[in-house]
Image: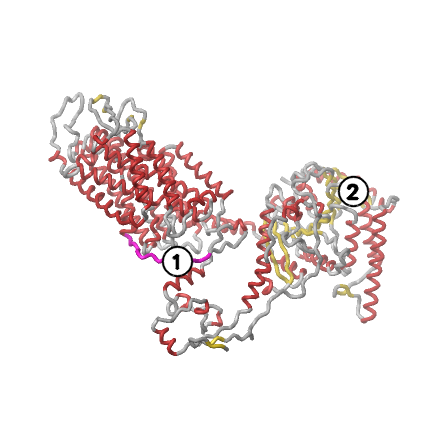
Amino acid sequence: MAADRDGVEIDTSDDNEVSSGRGAGGRKYRPVFAHDHDRAVLEMSSIDPVDRASSSAAFADHNNLKKVKVRMQPNMASEGRDGSLPNHGGVNDYQTESKLELFGFDSLVNILGLKRYGVNDHAVIMAADQIQAPSSPRDGDDGINNVERPKVNSVKLGTKMGVFIPCLQNILGIIYYIRFSWIVGMAGIGESLLLVAFCGSCTFLTTISLSAIATNGAMKGGGPYYLIGRALGPEVGVSIGLCFFLGNAVAGALYVLGAVETFLNAVPKAGIFRDTETFVKVNGTDVAQPITSPSLHDLQVYGIIVTIILCFIVFGGVKMINRVAPAFLIPVLFSLFCIFIGIFSARKNHPVGELVSLATFTRLLYDGVTGLSLESFKDNWSSDYQTTNNAGIPDPDGKIYWNFNALVGLFFPAVTGIMAGSNRSASLKDTQRSIPVGTLSATLSTTGLYLVSVLFFGALATREKLLTDRLLTANVAWPFPAIIYIGIILSTLGAALQSLTGAPRLLAAIANDDILPVLNYFKVPDGSEPHIATLFTAFLCIGCVVIGNLDLITPTITMFYLLCYAGVNLSCFLLDLLDAPSWRPRWKFHHWSLSLLGALICIVIMFLISWAFTVVSLALATLIYYYVSIKGKAGDWGDGFKSAYFQLALRSLRSLGASQVHPKNWYPIPLIFCRPWGKLPENVPCHPKLADFANFMKKKGRGMSIFVSILDGDYHECADDAKAACRALSTYIDYKRCEGVAEIVVAPTMSDGFRGIVQTMGLGNLKPNIVVMRYPEIWRRENLTEIPATFVDIINDCIVANKAVVIVKGLDEWPNEYQRQYGTIDLYWIVRDGGLMLLLSQLLLTKESFESCKIQVFCIAEEDSDAEELKADVKKFLYDLRMQAEVIVVSMKSWDGQSEQQDESVGAFTAAQERITSYLGDMKEKAEKEGTPLMADGKGVIVNEQQVEKFLYTTLKLNSTILKYSRMAAVVLVSLPPPPLNHPAYFYMEYMDLLVENVPRLLMVRGYRKDVVTLFT
């Protein structure tokens, strides 16, 4: 007992210390190696061995923790009540004595930090308790990230400043000021209303989906990329996120060109190059009205200069951008006010001029502005699509023809910007309230503004005025156009600044997730500015500015934005349809049908605009998706696809039921017994050839294998070793490209472990139906006398559990996928096995290693007279099974007449007789000495010496037949005899050793009480 200077007494007694380590009852087999030149073993030598010692040491350290008792002095208790409990900075500060010690966890008061911890400590503790998803499960590690102290944001934004105003500022942009009146003139009032409603419904439904996803939990940086990636998986998230990044970068160029074009129209003398002139053709008549348009070179020069200036501002950081944000918003609102005041007072400021010849126009005003006129409303109701030049000026010789589909692509950027609020989720006080309310308010407000503006613009001026005056909003504004020019320039520059600010952060968020190695250059530490990503975004923006054509850029932006919106809708559709327990959004006004409708509208709009741009954008997203799938290090984010796979698996499992599977639908589900006899090198958790053999049992890779290994010992002591072994085995399976899962079982003995596995492994009809293991060839050589009993127990357990058995002899010589075999595949079909042996031979022929081989079927006839009839029946049976094979019948009587006995077989037979006689004599001597019945392996046995002699003779003759006909076969398959009842396991091993003697590559197959092949279609 020791006391520190603060009066805290610490009890360091070791009474409750728990000793760790594995029990001493494990197997003591010596290592069994494959051949030194085995290619598979040499390949596996590059895999690092699993460090099990570290896990065991960690377990031991956990059990060696001292029991700590903390007593506080009265003065310290008073300080604690005042909230000024001193913090010593150690972990033991939280390990005070708890009244709820029985439950093994801390109380809710301590966990929630209501009394003993400060706010910062509580945040750190709660963050440390969260289990991070593995960053790269394909690497085979846990991927648990280090938890840093969360940074406290001093400024938190509400719904108005954090969501509504940014969305409003991004939605109201250049399209409304310099293109909307032109759209009304081209499409007419009726189709313009349809256009606004169509595009507005897309963003409205997307906002509903966004609100549902955003209110289903906390959001991190990345905006829509974070939402889509966590809902549809990292591959889909990265592909759509990169496309959305490109859309934002191109949108920055759109806003820059809009600001420059407005400036040059307001100040024509600022142009460096000569302006162009064009003639407008209205209703088939040429009007000699020169209309100035900024030169393309002027747009390029000024656009590059503005982009560079904005890039320098972005390098100043987010704080500088947030300070000037209100300065960009006020001109927008004031300009809207001036526009509507000008619309209502247009008749006074623009008096009606005299009518010209009726042959030219029905009603043409001096300047084309009629004020709010019902006659203009009627004239402009219908559409008047025509060709224009690159600047949008109507020209009968123009190369661009406009229709409703093209106007959708031109107008849709005017409704984008709904993601601006979600991009600022880290700075919001309450994301689950602000994002739905703010985004939906901005969407409805701007859509209503557009609908009202269509009616006002259609009644304000003639069609030719709407088509030729690109800045009609400025000309009708009150009190003078300069205010609108200033408002347009500032609003578009503000939107461009937001694009150049958000796009680099989106790219940095994708890079920080460490999914694509090629994006590692754009990684930034937390709290730092993404300077490299900003330079890359500015480079893309300048490249689009060089194009200089506003109407050619907008369709590109539309495709990328629509792709992102479709991703958000599909994410909500999938999550809503699956309705997992974790899907509990606070936003209740959503349904999967609305999300599906929103996604369909997005896709329809994409094809309406341009099928070529749609195909290119989808192809780009698909290429990124496959690149991430192949090269990326995608982690498990709990996305909706995983939930969909889970529910699909459950439904499929229920549909399979528990009844017998029809032979036409039978698939081998092998249970691979990895390390039953002896030990392989520590860095090879399973014999390399077992994985190759598991792949040979599948047709075109279809099917599932279960790799199982058993650890001897106590589960509580070996749990960490089992987890480490399971990770190593899973890595090995992936390395061998074998479709399967790994399972590690801890049991006192191998027999107990296997008995538990064969009873419980699998679900329904997805339980393993074949047990695959290697033959224990080492048992006599290594004098491992416990192997026979274990081997016989495993076979008997398989028979009782109705599992097929395949035992591989000569596993070290089994070919891999690169070694081509020639010769025959010989089947010694002795007993009815449901056709399993025939099916295995056909599966072997589907592999490149055995595709050059032919099948020979040897049948055993008891009488010579039955040979021909049996041969005919087997040939007919194989024909009906669509199997090509040569049939050979061997008579049992011919065995007795064989004069050519194999010397090695006879020698093995004699040696087996001597060993069995010696073993039987020892058993009898022990039984007489102890006065008990004959016992073997702790069980009573009955020995019929004549039957033992008969079994030995049968296996001798079968072995001689195999050596006579199949010595050069690529592989031999023979029926596996079951262990005789009440016979010692040692005797059965002698039978098996005699059967496999001198056969280099042999498969012993025993089917089960189910047919796996059928004659019928």
Mark 2, other Cα within 10 Å: few <14 / some 14–19 / many ≥20: some
Q: Which residues are magenta?
A: 146-159
Q: Nearer the viewer, residue 36 or 213?
A: 36
Can residue 600 be seen in the rendering of this structure? no
Q: Which x, y percent locates residue 915?
A: 83, 58
Residue 432 vs 968, above or below: the answer is below
Residue drawn where x is 47% and y is 46% of the image: 515
Amino acid at the residue labelled 2: Arg
Q: Which residue is mark 2?
A: 967
Can residue 584 be seen in the rendering of this structure? yes
The numbered mark at residue 150 is 1
Which is closer to the viewer, label 2 or label 1?
Answer: 1
Residue farthest along the bottom direction in this orientation:
74
Q: Secondary structure at mark 2?
A: loop
Residue farthest along the front direction in this orientation:
5
Q: Which x, y percent locates residue 393?
A: 26, 27
Q: Which x, y percent locates residue 696?
A: 65, 44
Amino acid at the residue labelled 1: Pro
Q: Nearer the viewer, residue 243 or 964?
A: 243
Q: Secondary structure at mark 1?
A: loop
Does the magenta run of residues contain 590?
A: no
